[in-house]
Image: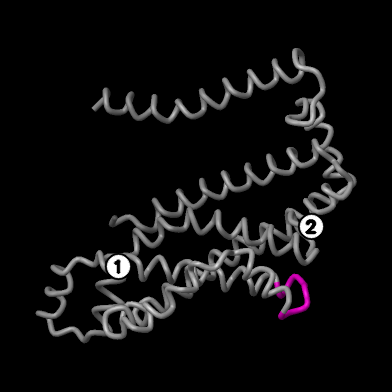
Amino acid sequence: MIQSYNSSLSKSKTPISVLLTLLFVYVILFEFILPFNNVIPKPTLILESLVSLWNDYNLFDAFASSTSVVYVSLLLGYLIINFLSGYLIKIYFELPGIYNGLKIFRYFPAFFYAILFAFWFPTSFIAEFIFVMIAAIFFYGLSLIDQCSKADEAYIDSAKSFGLSNQKIYSKVVWKNLQPEVFKSTYKIHYYLWILILLFEFIGGVEGFGSLYKNVLEFSDFAGLFALAIVIAILIWLGNLAIKIIENKLIYWK
């Protein structure tokens, strides 16, 4: 048991060790050895750009706008799929033609949907929120439908032997059987929503990280591009940590 604990501890330390090593090499190379270049900026320039993003580009406003949309949409999307799960599972088992017909929409690039939505509606915070929430519901719905083929027949047969209706079997038995894997897709959906919101804000000029990227590009702020990427990467990492904590607390039967 001690050996297993030590093994898992060493595995968790490995990514951190690699990251610290790469960070050390980056600082030494680009701060002290290599001359100024347009490939990767010096660490001091990135730090200065972080201050500039806060003071000159309204980083906090962009943070408040983008993160609120992503995480509220992620939460509402999951809750809506949780509510509709029985009906979606019913469609898979009883009306498979509808699901097969909708498959085509998953092959369109996300860029197309972002432009289309910006074309249909005036670009605003409300339009952005609706767009991202619809995307969250769509992704969770796809995840649920994709998992339906993996439903355990033993649970379904047992529920039928107790005389449960099909709707109750779908919403109470099959959903609980599939819920851990559907929730696990939150990590991917979380990342997809960040991509979509950046696209939508960049295209429509809605206040947020996407429009911030647009401003940074317009001013040719090379170090600012890296600084902004680091901020967003840290937020996504923290978001994944929060999702992991919620998963361990809520999906305890997996």
Q: Position of residue 102 (x, y in %)?
A: 44, 78
Q: Residue at x 82, y 48 (%)?
A: 217
The residues bearing labels 2 and 1 have C-alpha atoms spaced at a distance of 40 Å
Q: Is residue 77 magenta?
A: no
Q: Decide: few, some or many residues near mark 1? Use Cα within 10 Å; few <14, some 14-19, many ≥20.
A: some
Q: Amino acid at mark 2?
A: Ser
**What range is drawn magenta here?**
120-127
The circle drawn on residue 252 is none
Q: Position of residue 77 (x, y in %)?
A: 52, 70
Q: Position of residue 231 (x, y in %)?
A: 69, 43
Q: Nearer the viewer, residue 127 or 98?
A: 98
**Colouring used for the render:** one colour
Q: Residue at x 41, y 60 (%)?
A: 183
Residue 120 image-quadrant placement? bottom right
**SS type, badge 1:** helix
Q: Decide: few, some or many residues near mark 2? Use Cα within 10 Å; few <14, some 14-19, many ≥20.
A: many
The circle drawn on residue 176 is 1
Q: What is the quadrant of the C terminus in the image?
A: bottom left
**SS type, badge 2:** helix
Tell me the residue that label 2 is attached to. 211
